[in-house]
Amino acid sequence: NVFLYPWICWAIWSVRNKKIFNNQDVTPADTIEKAIREAREWQMAQDCKEQQTHQQNPKQTIICSDAAWKEDAEIAGLRWTITNRDLGVLENKSSSCPQTGLPLLAEAKALLAGL
C-alpha cells in the first residue's frame, strides 16, 4: 500500500504551477488520477530498487539532499546527509550557494554537494 497524501499534495502543487505559469486548467479528477498513477509508479520502482540493492549491494550508501531557494537574492541554502546501513551517518552538512538563478539548479547543487 502506498500512502497517497504526499502524492496528492504534489499533484495539487503541480496543477497550481500549470495554472500560474502556463494558464493550463486541470480537473480535480485528473489531478487525483495523476497522484495515484505516480504513487504506483514510485512504489513499483522502489520495490524493484530494493530487490536489486539486496542482490547487488546490501551495504548501500544513501544520499539525502535538499535545497531552499530565495528568488530575489538568487541564493540557495543546501543540505545533505550521507548514510550507510552499517556505519550510520557518514556526513551531515549544509552550505549556501550564491548566484543560483533557478530552484531546480539549487536542488541539483544540493545533490552534487553530497556526491
Image: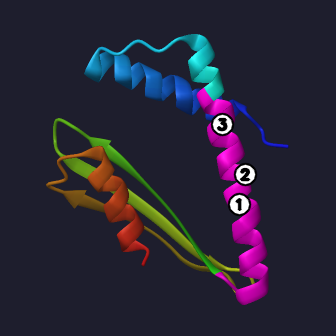
In x, y percent, where is residue 104?
32, 49
Q: CA distance from mark 1 to mark 2?
A: 5 Å
Q: Amino acid at mark 3?
A: Arg
In x, y percent, where is residue 37?
65, 36
Above or below 34: residue 45: below
* Relative depth, front residue between 101 and 68: 101
Q: Is residue 36 magenta?
A: yes
Label 3 CA crowd tier, 10 Å (few <14, some 14–19, many 20+): few
- Foreground: disc 1 or disc 3: 3
What residue does disc 3 label? 37
Q: Amino acid at mark 2?
A: Gln
- Per the picture, the main secondary structure of the magenta-coloured stretch is helix
Above or below 39: residue 57: below
* Relative depth, front residue between 14 and 44: 44
What residue does disc 2 label? 43
Q: CA distance from mark 2 to mark 3?
A: 10 Å
What residue does disc 1 label? 46
Label 2 CA crowd tier, 10 Å (few <14, some 14–19, many 20+): some
